[in-house]
Image: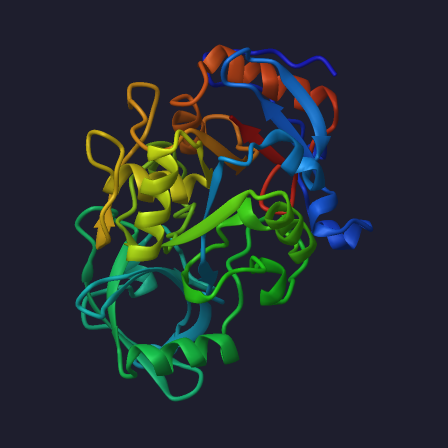
Amino acid sequence: MNNIIENDLSFVLPEALCAHEPPEARGLSRDGVRLLHIDRQSQAVTHSQFKQLPSFLNRSDLIVFNRSRTLPAVLLGHDTVTGTVVELRLAEHLNDDSWLALLICHGRDEENTFKCGLRQGLKLELPGNLEAEVVSRDSRIHRLWRLRFNKPYSELIALLFKYGRPVRYEHVPQRWPIDFYQNVYASEPGSAEMPSAGRAFTWSLLFDLHRRGIRSTSIILHTGLSSYLDDELDNSHPSSEEELVIDVEAADAINRARMKGGRIIAVGTTVVRALESAADDRGFLRPIKTYTTLKIDADHKLKCVDGLITGLHEPEASHLDMLSAFVKPKELVAAYKSAIEQGYLWHEFGDLNLIV
């Protein structure tokens, strides 16, 4: 393939390299996807399979997972006054028990909120006797609205898993059940979209890592939406305010590994955001429950995280800015060009990248 590198983090991604379905539908196991390894010291690129991950790690390394579980965050309802069908995509749970959500009107002019009827005070009738009232437009991300539901958190989550469906974009034409959007170790419901870097881990691979003495721990960062269906807004890379939790066990495990000289390997950009948000100047952590809007780019000096397992990201994606904190943009794009030439697949059902 002839792919022209245009700018520091700009490249051409052929449409054929978008993963349109889970690897299981392509005859692979979850850990049978490919692994692109970039060595942070030598910049050498190695092509492998994800199930070979243990061969790239050391016994002193600590893997940090995000145990947030993906919500079926999409519900269809209707305006109780006009009857307009409205798609609700939950984005973030706020600390006052309200939610931020993207509201999409069906059969109306979605760009004109007046015609569409999106407004403060709007009441939506949803499945399972669930109701939502629009409190206000979000002041940070104008496409989001703050909602209050008539059910407490636990009942709302149960209704989502009964009536909701996962967020899905155009590159995935077929609907897949929520189980295809869950990581095997996920336990705490809360993410609007799958923390997809962990999808390739299987119980077999986790046991293999354990047998080799490679330890792990987990934190929580509930992910928001990756797109607000607004090109101008998406291209500005607004930083979501996402909830994170680092408990005593995780903080202690990470601090012990650092004191012993071990590498901290984050599974996903969500884990990088969480750890770098919570770490002190020496890279050590304390238990914390908070929200973060941290944006990480080439100017960010990593305090806690030494390596990263992540998916392959689209040209100009904000996640590429974060990856440039680990490797220089030139080396990152060169590695991506190699992956394109080798036919790697992009997006949440695609192949993986290890930078360490």
Tell me the quarter of the image containing the N terminus.
top right
Can you tell which quarter of the image residue 113 is in?
bottom left
Task: Residue 220 in the image: state x and y as whole percent.
Answer: 37, 55
Query: Residue lying farthest front?
Result: 260
* Residue nearest the observer in this picture, 115 or 137: 137
Task: Residue 35 in the image: state x and y as whole percent.
Answer: 66, 33
What residue is rendered at 39% in x and 38% in y? 257
Side (left or right) of 198 relative to 344: left
What residue is rendered at 45% in x and 71% in y? 75
What residue is rendered at 66% in x and 53% in y? 173
Query: Residue lying farthest bottom?
Result: 129
> Could you tell me if residue 124 is visible in this image?
no
* Residue nearest the observer in this picture, 257 or 291: 257
> Could you tell me if residue 26 is visible in this image?
yes
Task: Residue 188 in the image: state x and y as whole percent.
Answer: 42, 66
What residue is rendered at 61% in x and 11% in y? 4
- Picture layout, residue 212 above or below residue 223: above
Task: Residue 196 in the image: state x and y as whole percent.
Answer: 54, 48
* Residue nearest the observer in this picture, 314 or 15: 314
Query: Residue lying farthest right?
Result: 27
- Picture layout, residue 2 above or below residue 102: above
